[in-house]
Image: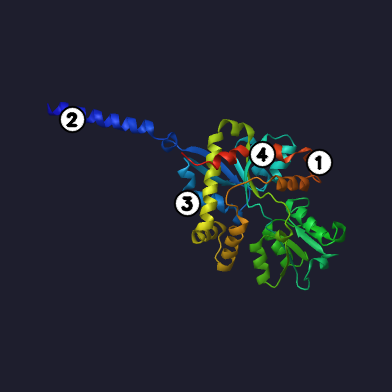
């Protein structure tokens, strides 16, 4: 008799477990795996780092592997299906689309011009750059494009200066310190480093109000068609991360310091300052006027880019769905 009662209890217990399992969302049982790459290391990767640290990916039922693949190879990895999404400035992706790649943008973050022009001692204003050597990462890259636009605002053509391709942010800092260039274009944190060494910021390019599209999330069109709900949840996790960055400065600074290996409190503060506040939207977006500027910046080196239309390079419905209240 006792064995019968125990058997009934066990049966009821198994039935309850089965019913609970059936009503739980499937993503709580097996998270959807995603491989997401950032194409450089810098403060603007904070939304991805925060989404991981604060558990927003997990909350959305995602198992995200974050991978750093630098520069052009990151876009190649996206095209080849080695990664599922790419978080990067959009120019390499646009170049690939101009060449026939079936890629599309679903969100962007930091749509502000986070560049400053820093010059050597004795140069106090933009007009004094005439006849000088200016450092950029690569000729015809995005920094070069916006530097040309800034010079034009001050009546200086590219023929009035000499552009030198000296490499990434740290390479440009070194080139200015060594006197290889008279001025260069860097982010605010590196501008602060240079100012501490006696150099002078002569222009915050953001003050010129150029249209900009910042770090954008790109995916393969085929992947978006097959796994669209997963991409909506990825964007939703990034949106939650952006909100957390605004609301929790101390955690944000810890995440920045750890991932950028920073110890100088002033530089950590500056990194947080230009990756939060007015520089960070309240929700991901896709500014088409900024995308048009990005396309225009590539035409000199990628002639086929002139045939691209901004609205054809985006899927705005992912943002719309990510903004809807969750059930």
**Tag 3: Cα neighbours inside 10 Å, few (<14), some, or many (≥20)?**
some
Q: Is residue 86 above or below residue 202?
A: above
Q: Name the outermost residue toward the right.
A: 159
Which residue in the structure is indicated by mark 2?
Answer: 6
Q: Is residue 200 above or below residue 27?
A: below
Find numbered disc 4 in the image and state the secondary structure of the residue it sits on: loop
Q: Give yes or no for contact between labels 1 and 3 (Cβ–Cβ under 8 Å).
A: no
Q: Is residue 161 above or below residue 313?
A: below
Q: Name the outermost residue toward the left.
A: 1
- The mark nearer the N terminus, 2 or 4, is 2
Alpha carbon distance from label 1 to label 3: 43 Å
Alpha carbon distance from label 3 to label 4: 28 Å
**Tag 4: Cα neighbours inside 10 Å, few (<14), some, or many (≥20)?**
some
Residue 42 visible at all: no
Q: 234 and 327: which one is in front?
A: 327
Task: Write the residue at 72% across / 60% down.
Answer: 205
Give the quadrant of residue 180: bottom right
Task: Write the residue at 55% across / 58% down.
Answer: 256
* Residue 314 marker: 4
* Residue 74 coordinates in the image, percent (x, y): 64, 43
- The mark nearer the N terminus, 3 or 2, is 2
Give the quadrant of residue 12: top left
Which residue in the structure is indicated by mark 3?
Answer: 54
Q: 197 and 222: which one is in front?
A: 222
Which residue in the structure is indicated by mark 1?
Answer: 303
For the N terminus, give its image quadrant: top left
């Amino acid at each position: 008799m006792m064995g019968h009662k125990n058997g009934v209890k066990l049966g009821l217990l198994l039935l309850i477990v089965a019913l609970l399992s059936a009503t739980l969302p499937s993503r709580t049982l097996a998270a959807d795996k995603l491989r997401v790459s950032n194409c450089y290391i810098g403060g603007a990767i904070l939304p991805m780092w925060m989404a991981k640290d604060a558990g927003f990916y997990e909350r959305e039922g995602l198992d995200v592997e974050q991978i750093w693949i630098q520069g052009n190879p990151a876009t190649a990895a996206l095209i080849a299906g080695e990664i599922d999404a790419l978080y990067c400035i959009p120019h390499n992706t646009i170049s690939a689309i101009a060449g026939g790649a079936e890629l599309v943008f679903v969100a962007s973050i930091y749509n502000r011009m986070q560049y400053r022009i820093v010059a050597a001692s004795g140069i106090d204003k933009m007009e004094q750059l005439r006849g000088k050597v200016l450092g950029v990462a690569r000729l015809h890259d995005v920094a070069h494009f916006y530097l040309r636009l800034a010079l034009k605002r001050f009546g200086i053509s590219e023929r009035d200066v000499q552009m030198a391709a000296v490499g990434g942010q740290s390479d440009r800092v070194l080139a200015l310190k060594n006197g290889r260039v008279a001025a260069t274009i860097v982010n605010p944190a590196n501008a602060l480093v240079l100012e501490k060494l006696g150099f002078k910021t002569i222009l915050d390019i953001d003050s010129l109000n150029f249209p900009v599209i910042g770090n954008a999330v790109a995916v393969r069109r085929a992947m978006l068609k097959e796994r669209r709900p997963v991409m909506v949840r990825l964007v939703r996790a990034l949106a939650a991360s952006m909100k957390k960055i605004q609301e929790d400065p101390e955690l944000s600074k810890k995440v920045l310091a750890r991932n950028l290996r920073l110890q100088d409190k002033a530089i950590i503060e500056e990194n947080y300052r230009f990756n939060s506040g007015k520089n960070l939207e309240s929700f991901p977006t896709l500014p088409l006027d900024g995308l048009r500027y990005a396309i225009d910046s590539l035409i000199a080196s990628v002639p086929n880019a002139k045939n691209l239309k901004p609205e054809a390079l985006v899927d705005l419905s992912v943002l719309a769905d990510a903004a809807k209240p969750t059930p």
